[in-house]
Amino acid sequence: MLPQTQSRKDRERKAREELIVDHARRLLLSHGFQGFSLDDLARSIEYSKGTIYQHFESKEDLALAVATSALKERADLFERAARFQGKSRERARAIGFACCHFMVAYPDYFHVEMMMKSQSFWEKASEERRRQNAMQAGRTFRSMLEVVHAGFEAGDLSRERLSAEEIAIAMASVTVGSHIMSHVPEMRLLAGIDDSIRIVRQNQDLLLDGMGWKSLLADFDYAATDLRIRSEIFPEATWFQTP
Amino acid sequence: MLPQTQSRKDRERKAREELIVDHARRLLLSHGFQGFSLDDLARSIEYSKGTIYQHFESKEDLALAVATSALKERADLFERAARFQGKSRERARAIGFACCHFMVAYPDYFHVEMMMKSQSFWEKASEERRRQNAMQAGRTFRSMLEVVHAGFEAGDLSRERLSAEEIAIAMASVTVGSHIMSHVPEMRLLAGIDDSIRIVRQNQDLLLDGMGWKSLLADFDYAATDLRIRSEIFPEATWFQTP
Amino acid sequence: MLPQTQSRKDRERKAREELIVDHARRLLLSHGFQGFSLDDLARSIEYSKGTIYQHFESKEDLALAVATSALKERADLFERAARFQGKSRERARAIGFACCHFMVAYPDYFHVEMMMKSQSFWEKASEERRRQNAMQAGRTFRSMLEVVHAGFEAGDLSRERLSAEEIAIAMASVTVGSHIMSHVPEMRLLAGIDDSIRIVRQNQDLLLDGMGWKSLLADFDYAATDLRIRSEIFPEATWFQTP
Amino acid sequence: MLPQTQSRKDRERKAREELIVDHARRLLLSHGFQGFSLDDLARSIEYSKGTIYQHFESKEDLALAVATSALKERADLFERAARFQGKSRERARAIGFACCHFMVAYPDYFHVEMMMKSQSFWEKASEERRRQNAMQAGRTFRSMLEVVHAGFEAGDLSRERLSAEEIAIAMASVTVGSHIMSHVPEMRLLAGIDDSIRIVRQNQDLLLDGMGWKSLLADFDYAATDLRIRSEIFPEATWFQTP
DNA sequence: CATGAATGAGCCTTCATTCAT
DNA sequence: TATGAATGAAGGCTCATTCAT
């Protein structure tokens, strides 16, 4: 077989796999793992169920591929954000920006993460897929740690009070939590929320201020930073509105 | 029929309904909505499936009753916490304590909340059940608002920067997010977490400090407060360890 | 609930279970275990597949029930045969008769036994069903041993050469083998067989003679014995023809 | 196209067909007909499924080819055995030896024969393949008949009682039956069997003795014969143990 | 010729819901 | 009113067979 043919086949295979993952993501996010059926997926991609099984060895394997593909995208965004040129707090802000950007793209992504909590889930996914997932998770976390350490070194952030890992997890927590809470319909009603992203970013800032990460929001105007983040790092972030 | 008989029947009916909800909660939390089967439940309560359908019009209706009963319990805890005697920040801390207490009791409760996000879920639940759910959510939120307003009035918290609703939602967000993130296996591994509750409370404190809610953690030792919260409000909180 | 109602329900349940086993036997014998489908069975019994699962916990469990029901019938026949009044060799002949009777009723029964060879089969059947199967197998074997020991005691059969178990297994082997071979179409053609039963009984006799089990066929006319076996023990054996 | 090329292609084709049959035999014997998948086979032979279909018109056709190839091997063994130099009873013993040899090589071969009992199986196999199967079955049977006739002619065996075909079928029956029964787990347990081959040969001898085939086991020591059979005819029979 | 992606019918099994008793 | 047998539509998954390349 000619190399060209081989590579065309490879490309087609890859494209089909992406097609499957894309449609699976949509269905998975809207129905949850158990409510997501391979029959629906097959109908949606206009291929037969058998074809899906030529790419993924089980429903769990496919779901993990979906999760990993999102995770990879998040890791890419975080790495870009961590490269932002500026004070450490500005770089942390860029990571927060990246996280918001991710949330806009995958508003229900946390559903997917929840499904991965059960042990039996992981047992049914392929070894290779598990490995890739762990790798992408690591990349995301490392980007955050990098910025935290930059804060330590610049003296913007105290080394005494919290470890780098605690700070990273706090950043992740407030972001995830704010995202979830600001989308709960009852919360939106009770608290009169209309702009989820604003809530998320505001809470991120409160937390970083609480850590004493300089410069505090009270001492510095980050509006210009946000504009730079947007134009230098995330020109595709159409959701971002200047105040 | 005599009124007494009627009321005995009513009481029996109510008791059976509680029995069903109690067992359903256990199964729902451990298997998730789709993994929870009415056959298992019927076996567990030692009534038949038909009997379940005399109390709940669908599986979704029952699940909503479970969620509402948990929500009610949470609202009860929050109301108790809000009544704590002390500075406003201490009362906020009591609410955080209540939230941790709830999490220890229902560690997988967020799974249940997630399942309720799909639209089809609500359509299959009864009107009455939906109403009760909203009511309990309101009670929880109002307890938080009450403490925030106390902070405003005492001058412990600035009225200028954030609205009471924003503050309440920030508190809820950091709690939920920290709870979730501190239970993700990868996070625990990457960040070396072993005590989820400590992470949750720490992040709550960082946030309140970030808001400038007095007295800041840096200026005040809350260890004694925690002991009082425990002994005066939540004597049943066996998970609480003095440091 | 009145006892009558209870017992009527029980009877109905038992009858349905027998209906299922009867139809399953037919399908199992004609298509083999793997070729036998629960869809076909459901169509055949005119109940839904779900109903089958209210009686049997898996396809394997059902198949084992089929095998056990046949085994029980065989054990019943053997026990009746072992009680035949006469010389020990006549009683052995009665057991051979019983075996032929069983074969006429279940000509493809050995298909079923073959399917039970795989380990995974047994794992999927219920504990209770496995127990019953072992019990029926034991009954069959004990009937054979009883007659062999009667031969020993009467001095019709040498104790020196073979153990009782070896003799029993030889009897079973020649019967099973003759049954199978005399039904292979090619064999029937090559050897010009038209009466399978005659072949089976002939081979049984050759074997017993080979063991020196008195009285040898050469020394005694068993035709009258066969008539007695038939009239005293198996009046229902319509396949039996006087020569 | 040059004849040489043609014949080379033919040879390659034949070699591939043998490769397929060899691997198919292994899989078929270990998983049974329905449990044997063409995907597994294709992986095992390192050709594609399409290629298999260029040699066999269906799965059944292939399975029949496997059965026929085993049958051919058995016929070869029987023909070698029939050529043993010695008394007729010794030659019969050599055939029994051949049969045991075959069983050791293909312990699950009877599974394959069982699968061929269903009518639909034969309908899906090719005419040519069916013809070859019948041919190999004939060779096996003729070898047995040859030895039986030698017994008649030598006066070792009575012509009066049984026809040559009946004797041949009896030999085949006791062998097959003993093989099967001595492998049934329950039987092994109940009768305390540990050496299947011993059981098979013992029962063969009992049967031949029962026919009065001279010299009877009681009158002659066949141990030396067995050694000669092994060294002169089946030097490859490593399973054979001198007692 | 060889390939292997695609098919689609079929498999066993589960379960929310209904309804005659 | 309580029951639980019956249902039947899915569910995830397999695999013999075909056919464009």
Image: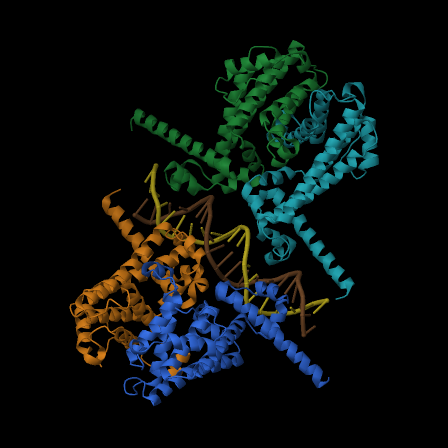
Chain colours: A orange, B blue, C cyan, D green, E yellow, F brown
Task: Specify whether B100 is left or right of D150.
Answer: left
Q: In the image, residue C26 lies at what x, y percent?
A: 65, 45
**Residue D125 appearing in the image:** no
In the rendered image of this protein, does residue A44 appear above or below residue C157? below
**Residue A37 appearing in the image:** yes
Outermost bottom residue:
B153
Depth check: give the residue in front, D43 or C29. Answer: D43
**Image quarter in which the C terminus of chain A is found:** bottom left
- Which residue is rendered at x = 25% and y = 67% of the image? A160
In the rendered image of this protein, does residue D131 appear above or below residue C134? above
- Which residue is rendered at x = 69% and y = 41% of the image? C136
Q: In the image, residue C186 lies at what x, y percent?
A: 59, 29
Q: Which quadrant holds residue B37?
A: bottom right
- Which residue is rendered at x = 29% and y = 63% of the image? A165
Task: Specify whether B18 is left or right of A34.
Answer: right
Q: Which quadrant holds residue C230?
A: top right
In the rendered image of this protein, does residue D233 appear above or below residue B148? above
Depth check: give the residue in front, A149 or B170. Answer: A149
